[in-house]
Image (spheres, coloured by chain):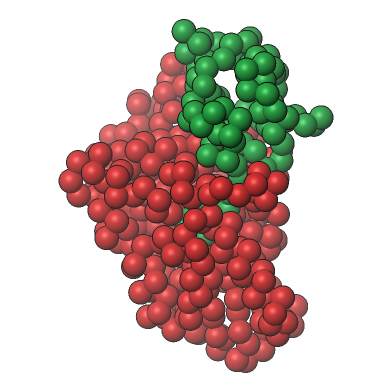
Chain colours: A red, B green
């Protein structure tokens, strides 16, 4: 396949069967390999759409500064787009994210403002909102509330899935900004009667949830509960175990959030199998494992890996 | 057997510092009412007139109860209920 530039090569990712993890020929799992995007994650879709929308709205000009709270993938995707389109990028990054993410951001030329580890991404969002208020000329694309994030998936991920898997019964993806689930979910619901849209949400250690008052919690502005049919919370231990299964069973070297998604997908598969129902379950592999090697997720016993991951934002 | 309810750090002042407590009831609503008898004030932090509070997530055996009927979700002995504050998540 031939593309005019790297940005033109976003999307169009393969959908690959998981024959060894699927319970039967009637209940099958399919993985959408989003690590095959230019910077190696699903976030390239949202970043390209958000920047294009801001350009169209006249918010960005040559040399403009883009500000974004991000613990990694969105920042890396935005860093590529910013570099190619002539913008500066400042990322507000929680301290407890992997070293590879910081290194990648720096390699692409982005600046990093650290935010405290306690509180995770909630805290990064808060710091970024304060910075945006102090620097009115900076443009915060704000992935948690930017409709172009969800639209990227409505216009690309959803149609790609439907074309490759018209018989789809379930769509499972990680829940963060909710952009992937909202956009793909809305598209699939419009085209596939009865399709289930399932969120898999990482459950972190206690440090990440912090000690803030419950009234200061965070729900992304994009999140619309009515698009989903269910939502599962997946522990670090289960996510790690499944990440290793993807590698050992299917040869798929995925990031830890993909283990989280697989755990939920396998639960749905077992339920369909027990009920004697046909199922074609598509799940999103958001990124590959490279950025998580230093977390120790792939080495030693599961207990050791889980201990190392405590307090880390792994998805 | 009873229903185990896991309490987040921020709410352990209501449970005397306990990370998990036990309760009973046929629905989530009954369970929370049962807990409130021993851990006064806890229920009010979890739910309001519209159901589970906006920035609180309650999971029944790891599934969000909002998709299981909310407060009328049936619960039974051996179930695990996990309460967590809503956070922005990780690698976004």
Tell me if A198 is positioned left or right of A189 in this view: left
Q: Which residue is drawn at 38% across and 41% down?
A: A236
Tell me if A70 is positioned left or right of A131 in this view: left
**Where A47 falls versus A5 (above or below)?**
above
**Where B1 falls versus A105 (above or below)?**
above
Q: Residue at x 56, y 48 (%)?
A: A211
Closer-to-camera residue (A313/A210):
A210
Check the image and name the residue furthest to the front: B16
**Where A265 falls versus A139 (above or below)?**
above
Closer-to-camera residue (A262/B91):
B91
Q: Is residue B10 visible?
A: yes
Check the image and name the residue furthest to the bottom: A62
Q: Is residue A183 visible?
A: no
How many labels, in total?
Answer: 0
Residue A26: give x, y in percent of width and height: 41, 25
Residue A15: give x, y in percent of width and height: 42, 49
Residue A273: give x, y in percent of width and height: 43, 20
Residue B15: give x, y in percent of width and height: 56, 27
Tell me if A33 is positioned left or right of A251 in this view: right
Tell me if A291 is positioned left or right of A284 in this view: left
Closer-to-camera residue (A310/B72):
A310
**Where A157 falls versus A282 (above or below)?**
below
Q: Residue at x 70, y 46 (%)?
A: A215
Which of the image's four quarters has the N terminus of chain A? bottom left
Q: Residue at x 81, y 30 (%)?
A: B49
Check the image and name the residue furthest to the left: A300
Q: In which quarter of the image is residue A50?
A: bottom right
């Amino acid at each position: 396949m031939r593309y005019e530039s790297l940005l033109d090569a976003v999307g169009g990712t393969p959908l690959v069967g998981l024959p060894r993890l699927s319970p039967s020929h009637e209940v099958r799992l399919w993985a959408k390999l989003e690590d095959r995007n230019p910077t190696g994650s699903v976030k390239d879709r949202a970043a390209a759409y958000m920047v294009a929308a801001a350009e169209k709205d006249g918010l960005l000009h040559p040399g403009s500064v883009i500000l974004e709270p991000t613990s990694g993938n969105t920042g890396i995707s935005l860093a590529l787009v910013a570099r190619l389109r002539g913008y500066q990028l400042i990322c507000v990054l929680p301290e407890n994210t992997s070293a590879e993410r910081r290194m990648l951001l720096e390699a692409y030329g982005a600046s990093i403002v650290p935010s405290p580890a306690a509180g995770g991404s909630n805290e990064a969002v808060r710091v970024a909102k304060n910075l945006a208020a102090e620097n009115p000329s900076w443009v915060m694309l704000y992935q948690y509330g930017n409709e172009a994030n969800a639209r990227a998936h409505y216009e690309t991920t959803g149609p790609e899935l439907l074309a490759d898997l018209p018989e789809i019964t379930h769509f499972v993806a990680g829940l963060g900004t909710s952009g992937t689930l909202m956009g793909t979910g809305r598209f699939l619901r419009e085209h596939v009667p009865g399709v289930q849209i399932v969120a898999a949400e990482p459950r972190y250690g206690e440090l990440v949830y912090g000690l803030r008052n419950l009234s200061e919690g965070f729900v992304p502005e994009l999140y619309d509960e009515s698009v989903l049919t269910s939502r599962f919370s997946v522990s670090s231990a289960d996510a790690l175990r499944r990440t290793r299964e993807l590698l050992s069973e299917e040869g798929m070297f995925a990031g830890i959030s993909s283990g989280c998604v697989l755990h939920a997908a396998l639960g749905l598969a077992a339920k369909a199998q027990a009920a004697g129902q046909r199922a074609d379950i598509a799940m999103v592999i958001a990124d590959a494992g490279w950025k998580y090697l230093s977390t120790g997720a792939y080495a030693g016993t599961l207990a050791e890996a889980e201990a190392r991951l405590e307090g880390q934002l792994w998805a | 057997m009873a229903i185990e309810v896991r309490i987040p750090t921020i709410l352990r002042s209501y449970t005397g510092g306990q990370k998990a407590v036990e309760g009973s009831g046929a629905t989530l609503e009954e369970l929370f009412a049962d807990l409130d008898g021993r851990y006064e004030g806890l229920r009010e932090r979890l739910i309001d007139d519209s159901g589970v509070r906006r920035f609180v997530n309650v999971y029944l055996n790891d599934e969000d109860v909002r998709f299981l009927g909310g407060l009328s979700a049936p619960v039974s002995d051996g179930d695990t209920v996990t309460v967590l504050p809503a956070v922005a998540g990780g690698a976004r």
